[in-house]
Amino acid sequence: MNDTSVVILQIDGREVKASAGTTVLQAAQKAGIHIPTLCHHEKLEAFGGCRLCMVEVQARGRTSYVVSCLYPVENDIVVRTRSEKVDKIRRVLVEELMAHAPDAPELVKLAEEFGADRDRFEREASFCVVCGLCVRYCNEVKQKNAVGFIANGALREISFVPELAKNECWQCQECFALCPTSYAQAAYLLTEALAFPGQRKAPIHGAQAPERVRRVIPINPVAAAA
Amino acid sequence: MARLQSAVELDELRAKILASRDPARPCIAVCAGAACDGMDSAAVAAAFLAAVDEHRLAGKLEVRTTGCHGYCEKGPNVVVTPGDICYFEVQPADVPDIVAATLKGEVVERLVYQDPVTGAKAVHMDEVPFYKHQTRLLIGDNPKIDPMRIDDYLAVGGYAALVKALTEMSPEQVLGEVKKANLRGRGGGGFPAGSKWETTRNAPDKTKYVIVNGHEGESAAFMDRAMLTGNPHKVLEGLIIGAYAIGAQRGFMYTRHDMPLLTKHVRAALAQAEEYGFLGEDILGSGFDFEVELHFDVGIFVSGESSALMRSIEGNAPEPRPKYIRTSVSGIWDKPSNLNNVETWANVPQIISRGAEWFTRMGSEGSKGTKLISLSGHVVNSGVVEVPMGTPLRTLVFDIGGGVRDGKALKAIHFGGAMGGSIPAQLIDARLDFDEMSKLGAPIGAGGLLLMDEDTDMIEVARYLLDFLVNESCGKCVPCREGMPQMRHILTNLTEGKGKPGDLERLEDLAEVTGLSSLCALGKTSADPLKSMFRYFKPELESRIPAGSEGK
């Protein structure tokens, strides 16, 4: 296998060159073609959890729906980043996520783009969307594992490990800025309040994770659900 | 025992075992399968052993504790050889009668099968309606084998196929035979096992693995458990032959941690196979080395998904990986890994010993051999059944299953558990065939067949099955983690009379998107039962939405 060889594929009608071993998402981004993502971060290993980067791929006469963040580029494949099906997948996924976090700016923007109805599905209690950015950043970049996944299925969520969070998180806080819904921050503060309250006096400002702007979600009353 | 060094030594051992067993000497086989065990068949077996002791019958009467015989409905099951006399619902109090009759060569009439309608009795296994319509190639040896004793397996010809593969055939010939037999995966997908083997064999990496997927978790499926608990060596023999064909040096048995009997039998089988020289270095002097390791799940259904299972063996959380590169090329520790289900492996020895031509004579055009089916639900005779592929469902449901309980009418037949589908009663003449059943929207899956009577609420069935999957999903990807609970929520409302306008459209969107965009097969097929409800039982769904509620 020669990973330096060049692959030519088609994305949205354009011929795109990419290095073998890279993904369709990388090829599209390099060519300036936009594919929405939520759980993707270029410093982290591709996760394939949010499924928003799903595209239509035609390869060897077969059409399939794949996540572009993981699908390897191949010669002669035809990629469509928008189609009726692709848009529908993204719309319903955003609607499902908005059952958790209807006001998260990233989701609000995606909802506009794909015509998602924030009130379509029954509200869920937690505003975590389990993108795993905090967990993976702490594991892969910081190598502290102070926050992890717990439980499985619909009950899966992130949780700080008090014993580790106590010593590691205060001076870092970089995952807060990665979180699309501010849940990581809330979960940390809850952990602190329960497990080691009053150890810190004032919040640290200016903790920054690379490549993402820190977002503060306005605490407005949620528009009355239908 | 010293390791067997050659095929000749195995033949000598087999002859010795057979010589020590007089086929005319009566043997009482007590089923200790999951269902009979639950009905305290252990007490029955203990009573037989006590009777042998008390009356000094050792040498005159053998008592054997075995795996599942199949007819779970009528357990505890006892089969007496010679003659395969079947006694049902045997209690410890019946033991003296059975012992006395057996010694005299007589039959205890009150314990044999009696037809519920005609009252006609059936004494021998091949006369009992539940058994006589079956072709029990895989499960049929269960009453003859104490799963803790490898000698019992050798006595019925065990490991002869391995000898044939190692001494008379090249790995390519073994692979060719399995391909020619068109053996399709019994775990759910129906993918040709031979092609999968070939992919792993041809993958450039020299380190290769073979795996038994014994993680049976599908609702209403209990035949792999019966197979692996009742005759672990058959599965193991298939695995060793497969490893030889593929060129694997190491194998894994991945199974459930929560079945003590299964664990005990598999552990014993692996230890005995190694002791006898069927595992380890230079197997039977052939120069082929192979070892097998036992692994347990962490208790969720998705552990049985191939890529999640492989993550689990690596020691990681059982989360599926996208299979844009197949596990047969890059699986455990990124090495080529061939995974087959228990029943698929169990088919291998007979294909090698009797040939692909014999195997393909059974079944339909596209599905060959036999299939193990777990029969349950509103059926008269629940149990583990084996029939040739292509058998009409009518035979399974009525001739073998005895029809619907309590004289009710049949409403639906459900296949494939929580990831399968339901078809209405009028499709009863469909055939047990991978492709035919898939087209009907009720893929065979692993082989769990659930009967539903006329009073069944199909919406409740869909809700119940989703409820199962919601708890078994790993929760990594959005459509599975979020889509299933939302579908369950709407279905719960419908069953509680709280249906709202737009619910059916919401359900259809969720079902479509979950199917298209989920990471693994669990999510992709989670909405299949619901889709079959839309296909065959839509009026029932519509009746739950208040009138005058078109659209949203």
Image (cartoon, coloured by chain):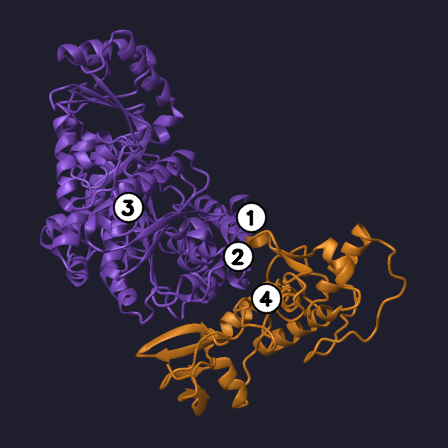
Chain colours: A orange, B purple
Q: Which residue is mark 3?
A: B236
Q: Rounded to the nearest whole Å, what is the CA distance between mark 1 and mark 2?
A: 9 Å
B110 shown above or below A174: above
Q: Secondary structure at mark 4?
A: helix
Q: Are marks 1 and 4 on the same chain?
A: no
Mark nearest the camera among 2 and 3 is: 3
Q: Rounded to the nearest whole Å, what is the CA distance between mark 4 and mark 3?
A: 48 Å
Q: Which residue is mark 2?
A: B503
The type of residue carrying mark 3 is Leu
Residue B283: which numbered mark, if any? none
Q: Rounded to the nearest whole Å, what is the CA distance between mark 1 and mark 4?
A: 19 Å
Mark nearest the camera among 4 and 3 is: 3
The type of residue carrying mark 4 is Glu
The numbered mark 1 sits on a residue in which chain?
B
Residue A95: which numbered mark, if any? 4
User: Closer to the camera, B316 or B223?
Assistant: B316
User: Is residue B442 in view from this perspective?
Assistant: no
